[in-house]
Amino acid sequence: MAVDLRIASYNILADAYVKPEWFPHTPADVFQPQRRQEALARRIAGLDADIVCLQEVEPGSFAALQRALEPRGYAGVLALKQQGRPDGCAVFHRLERCLGHRAHYFKDRLEDGRISGHLALVVDFDAGGDRLRVACTHLRWDRPDRPVEQHQGMQEAAELLEELVRRDPEALWVVCGDFNAQPGEPLVRAFAAAGLLDAYEGRHQPTCNANGIPKAIDFLFHSRALQAQPVRLPELDDRTPMPSETEPSDHLPIAARLLHA
């Protein structure tokens, strides 16, 4: 049967990571948690997506989004990072047949030897008779000059591809989230090398302007059997305030319509 759905990915900016000095162009009242939760709910609902993958989600934000999105037909699941981190990944959806979910915790280690606690949240769906597997993740930032074999985000990406995607090649896969890497970098190229397609290939726009530097670091990869029609993003440059009155996070959401005959 045919698949025709809309999927979005969005780093919503955890309140725990808000440092006003990092956002000098953002009015202080924009950071008020309840106000921002309400703005996030409106922004997410406005995406009109069948599946919404979120990063930097804290339990309080998840509960607020549940209250706002459930009346619109969405169900949600949250998986928190380990090692005392305050946030995690969440997936909201309005598909009739969800087949379950699991949190895959990466094996990469922190400088003190502990497991990092970062994860990919994988949710399975019956999408028109096809098995659709959606992996939502927030890969660790690491210095761009670190050798590829030691790069922590690259280690997580390689594990995600090897232990999840390649072990279930029959499924229709979507892997999305904040990759903390830019188009053309080795981490991003690894997903293409694994046979996945970048929904925004050739049409990348900045998705955040952290430290006043606009960059595209949010991605939506999918199996070759799917066709993607990406949604164009608002224009963003180094002077665009993020968060703002209209954008409640320091990232823009990305989204695409996915089709499978």
Image: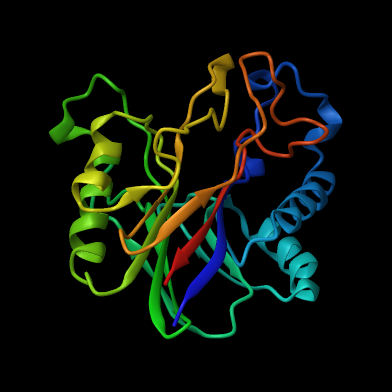
- In the image shown, does 33 or 243 lie closer to the viewer? 243
Q: Residue at x 70, y 60 (%)?
A: 48
Q: Residue 54, located in which quarter of the rendered image?
A: bottom right
Left or right of 249 on screen, residue 3? left
- Residue 29 position within the rendered picture, expressed as x and y whole percent measured from the top left: 86, 32
Examine the rendered structure and indicate whether residue 125 appears above or below residue 18: below
Q: Residue at x 38, y 29 (%)?
A: 182
Q: Residue at x 82, y 40 (%)?
A: 32
- What quarter of the picture does the N terminus occupy? bottom left
Q: Residue 107, located in which quarter of the rendered image?
A: bottom left
Q: Residue 113, located in which quarter of the rendered image?
A: top left
- State the scheme by which the image is colored: rainbow
Identify the residue at the far left of this view.
149
- What quarter of the picture does the C terminus occupy? bottom left
Left or right of 142 on screen, residue 24? right
Identify the residue at the far front of this view.
261
- In the image shown, does 176 or 105 lie closer to the viewer? 176
Q: How many marks?
A: 0
- Residue 240 position within the rendered picture, expressed as x and y whole percent measured from the top left: 69, 20
- Residue 57 position within the rendered picture, expressed as x and y whole percent measured from the top left: 59, 53
Left or right of 237 on screen, residue 215? left
Residue 111 seen anywhere in this rendered image of the structure = no
Q: Residue at x 68, y 21 (%)?
A: 23
Residue 165 seen anywhere in this rendered image of the structure = yes
Examine the rendered structure and indicate whether residue 52 appears above or below residue 184: below
- Residue 197 position within the rendered picture, expressed as x and y whole percent measured from the top left: 33, 49
